[in-house]
Image: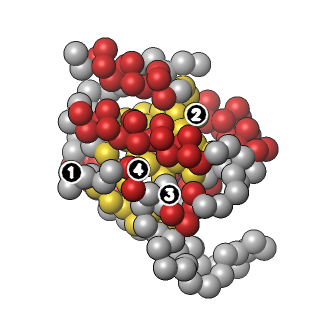
Amino acid sequence: MPITTLDPKTALVVIDLQKGIVALPTAHPTTDVVQRSAQLADAFRRHKLPVVLVNVAGGAPGRADQARGGEFPPGFTDLVPELNRQPSDHLVTKRTWGAFTNTDLHAYLKGEGVTQIVLVGVATSIGVESTARHAHELGLNVTLVTDAMTDLHNDAHHNSITRIFPRLGETGMTQDVLELLDRSRA
């Protein structure tokens, strides 16, 4: 289904577009994801809507078959410069897959009166999906911009986009969001 509307107070949430993540091999080029996400961030700022930039600086405790061990190398958590971080942007550093767990994201969005989030970033089936699930459970309207996200594996990306996301919110493309922003705030 296409994106039908953007609430008056909608925030853009950009997941893990940081140097260490975008350098990983992905199903779709991260350069395209970064470019589209930066375009959306500029548009949200222009319309005076919140922009949340999320990076990951750790992992959840506990055992897992595919646990990531060790420390991140220097620069790994640095946001990509193309996002053009502004003083008005809200930074969330997470240590789990989802951006809500043990962070101030929910309190920040609530304080800003946000009722909808637009999600972009990497990885579709990990950070993006975990954040979307939590947002949905909190009662936020969720919009997922599928051409501004990618995953480490194409099958995981496809599963999230075709099977999970339609149950959590509306999906669409960068151009859809840009047009809705311009039309609804003209």
Q: Position of residue 177 (x, y in %)?
A: 42, 25
Label located before the other in sequence (2 or 3): 3
- Measure the C-alpha gap from mark 2 to mark 3: 16 Å
> Is 91 or 166 nearer to us in this picture?
91
- Residue at 78% x, 73% y: name it: 65
Query: Disc 3 marks which amino acid?
Result: Asp
Amino acid on which the number 2 mark rests in the picture:
Asp
Q: Where does label 2 land, which residue? A: 147
Query: Which residue is located at x 57 percent, y 51 percent?
Result: 122
For marks 1 and 2, the one nearer the N-term is 1
Say which quarter of the image contains residue 71.
bottom right
Q: Is residue 91 left or right of residue 152?
A: left
Disc 4 to disc 1, C-alpha distance: 16 Å
Residue located beneath label 4 in the image: 82
On the image, the x and y values in percent for residue 87 come to 20, 55
Residue contact between numbered discs 1 and 2, judged by CB atoms under 8 Å: no
Amino acid identity at mark 1: Ser
Query: What's the residue at 32%, 38% (across, down)?
Result: 42
Quadrant (top left/top right/bottom left/bottom right) for the N terminus:
top right
Q: Which residue is mark 1?
A: 88
